[in-house]
Image: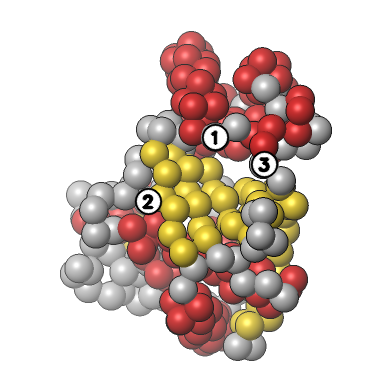
């Protein structure tokens, strides 16, 4: 629960609004509108973390694994993609952010362990992926929405499943719906752009070997899309006003990369 909502200054923005709302931008706004301003309007850089970097390396390997013909998607093939993934994802800026020398050895061990776990979870040679890192966009309820699907699988009966790789922890009992929020927006986008509502969402927690596999509810997907449209209206209102309110609280500020920026601008960020 937030303690207070703070509006500090009145200004107008030199930068344009993003052309579309992605699930990650939506989450930024819902957690704290000011965070959305910093990240998506002012475009202040957020330093990388070890966790996000490891996630990007794993996503890179799995993306390129699925670019191979099905019969070639072996564990050895995945291991052979590691160096290219590290070279692409761990740039000099990111090395500086995460003190690469101190975490490289552990990250390499973690990535190898994740790949081993992944191959215990599914056999990629048996999967018909009709989309890999697929951009998807549509205007729904007057809101321009977009996203990038990790994977879209075609099932034997012609139905489709959204697959999202997760390198973090699975949700605690009772929090599964929050974990599904991004994919429910993706489901709305699939229905709008390709004319087919996915029947399932599958979240693969590849660091833990667990899967959250749920049937898609058209009612929930529609509600998610409506909620995103309401957020888009509020974003446009705050943008026109020249300020997005800060919503400091111990929970939202704890892991926020913009604590120093907020404090410099007079927002009472909890210690
Ligand atoms: S530090 Fe807190 S108030 Fe400031 S942007 Fe981040 S979450 Fe919002």
Label 3 environment density (alpha carbons within 10 Å; few <14, some 14–19, many ≥20):
some
The number of callouts visible is 3
Q: Which mark is residue 95?
A: none
Label 1 environment density (alpha carbons within 10 Å; few <14, some 14–19, many ≥20):
few
Q: CA distance from mark 1 to mark 3?
A: 9 Å
The residue beneath circle 3 is 127
**Does dot 3 land on a helix, a strand or a loop?**
loop
Q: Is residue 96 visible?
A: no
Residue appearing at x 39%, y 39% in the figure? 210
The residue beneath circle 2 is 256
Q: Residue 42: percent from the left, percent from the top?
A: 58, 62
Q: Is the CB of the residue bearing disc 1 within 8 angstroms of ligand 1?
A: no
The residue beneath circle 1 is 122
The residue lying toward the viewer, choosing from 149 and 77, is 77
Q: Is the CB of the residue bearing disc 2 within 8 angstroms of ligand 1?
A: yes
**Counting residues from the N terminus, which is met first, the one under dot 1 or under dot 2?**
1
The residue lying toward the viewer, choosing from 94 and 71, is 71
**Does dot 2 land on a helix, a strand or a loop?**
loop
Q: Residue 212: percent from the left, percent from the top?
A: 41, 50
Q: CA distance from mark 3 to mark 2?
A: 38 Å
Q: Is residue 225 visible?
A: yes
For the N terminus, the quadrant is bottom left
Residue appearing at x 60%, y 32% in the figure? 123
Residue 37 relative to residue 136: left or right: left
Q: Residue 268: percent from the left, percent from the top?
A: 25, 62
Residue appearing at x 73%, y 52% in the figure? 131
Q: Is the CB of the residue bearing disc 3 within 8 angstroms of ligand 1?
A: no
């Amino acid at each position: 629960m937030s303690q207070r909502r703070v509006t500090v200054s009145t200004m107008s923005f030199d930068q344009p609004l993003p052309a579309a709302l992605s699930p990650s931008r939506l989450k930024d706004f819902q957690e704290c509108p000011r965070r959305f301003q910093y990240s998506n309007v002012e475009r202040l850089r957020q330093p990388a973390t070890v966790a996000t970097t490891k996630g990007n390396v794993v996503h890179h390997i799995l993306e390129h694994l699925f670019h191979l013909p099905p019969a070639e998607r072996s564990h050895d093939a995945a291991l052979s993609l590691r160096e290219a993934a590290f070279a692409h994802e761990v740039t000099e800026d990111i090395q500086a952010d995460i003190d690469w020398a101190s975490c490289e050895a552990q990250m390499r061990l973690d990535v190898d362990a994740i790949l081993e776990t992944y191959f215990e979870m599914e056999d990629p040679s048996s999967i018909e992926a009709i989309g890999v890192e697929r951009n998807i966009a549509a205007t729904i309820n007057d809101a321009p929405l977009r996203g990038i699907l990790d994977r879209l699988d075609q099932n034997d009966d012609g139905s489709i499943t959204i697959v999202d790789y997760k390198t973090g922890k699975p949700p605690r009992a009772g929090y599964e719906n929050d974990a599904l929020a991004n994919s429910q927006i993706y489901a709305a986008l699939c229905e709008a752009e390709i004319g087919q509502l996915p029947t399932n969402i599958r979240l693969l927690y590849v660091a833990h070997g667990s899967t959250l596999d749920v049937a898609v509810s058209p009612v929930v997907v529609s509600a998610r899309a409506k909620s995103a449209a309401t957020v888009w209206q509020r974003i446009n209102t705050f943008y026109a006003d020249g300020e997005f309110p800060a919503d400091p609280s111990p929970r939202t500020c704890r892991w926020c990369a913009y604590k120093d920026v907020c404090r410099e601008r007079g927002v009472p960020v909890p210690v």
